[in-house]
Amino acid sequence: MATRDIGAGSTAKAGTDGGRTLRLALKTDAVASGGLGVLALALGGLLDGPLGIPQSFLVAVGVFLLAYAAFLVVIATRPRVIAPAVWLVIVGNAAWVVASVVFAFVDWYPLTTLGVVVVLAQAVAVAVLAEMQVIGLRKAS
């Protein structure tokens, strides 16, 4: 199976700004994921009470998000973006959204109202990022 590359900026296959759009979506995801990861690591002990999410869980999520952000930076800054890697990110983001909605409404942890709002708000943000990535990938193809 051949791997399809997507060039940077205006050199995208379709001759549009799709490469720039895709890279912007990936970099935005990286910044948001990295920022949330740092927040979860640095303030997990302070957020567990107001959110109802244990510090240990917030720390684990923070570590994952930092690793994920690094992965996104690698994909977004390569000379050519590889479409299957982007689809992996999109599918992962979709899974994250579904898992977040389930997490918000299943009683795994006693989430506070603020905790439910925060979990659902970040799920919406991730869904928007996934959509931006789909649009960028389509424009670049």
Image (cartoon, grey):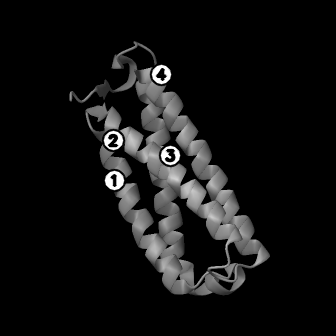
Numbered mark located on residue 28 in the image: 3
For the residues bearing labels 4 and 3, Cβ distance under 8 angstroms: no
- Residue topped by disc 1: 71
Q: Amino acid at mark 3?
A: Thr
- Residue 120 lies, in percent from the top left, at 69, 61
Which badge, 1 or 3, is on the more N-terminal residue? 3
Which badge, 4 or 3, is on the more N-terminal residue? 3
Res 114 quadrant in image: bottom right
Res 86 quadrant in image: top left
Which badge, 2 or 3, is on the more N-terminal residue? 3
- Element under disc 3: helix
Q: Amino acid at mark 4?
A: Lys
- Element under disc 4: helix
Q: For marks 4 and 2, give the one nearer the viewer.
A: 2
Q: Amino acid at mark 1?
A: Phe
On screen, 131 above or below 100?
A: above
- Residue topped by disc 2: 85
Viewer-nearest residue: 107 or 138: 107
User: Mark 3: few, some, or many residues within 10 Å (few <14, many ≥20)?
Assistant: some
- Residue 54 lies, in percent from the top left, at 58, 85
Q: Quadrant of the C terminus?
A: top left
- Residue topped by disc 4: 139
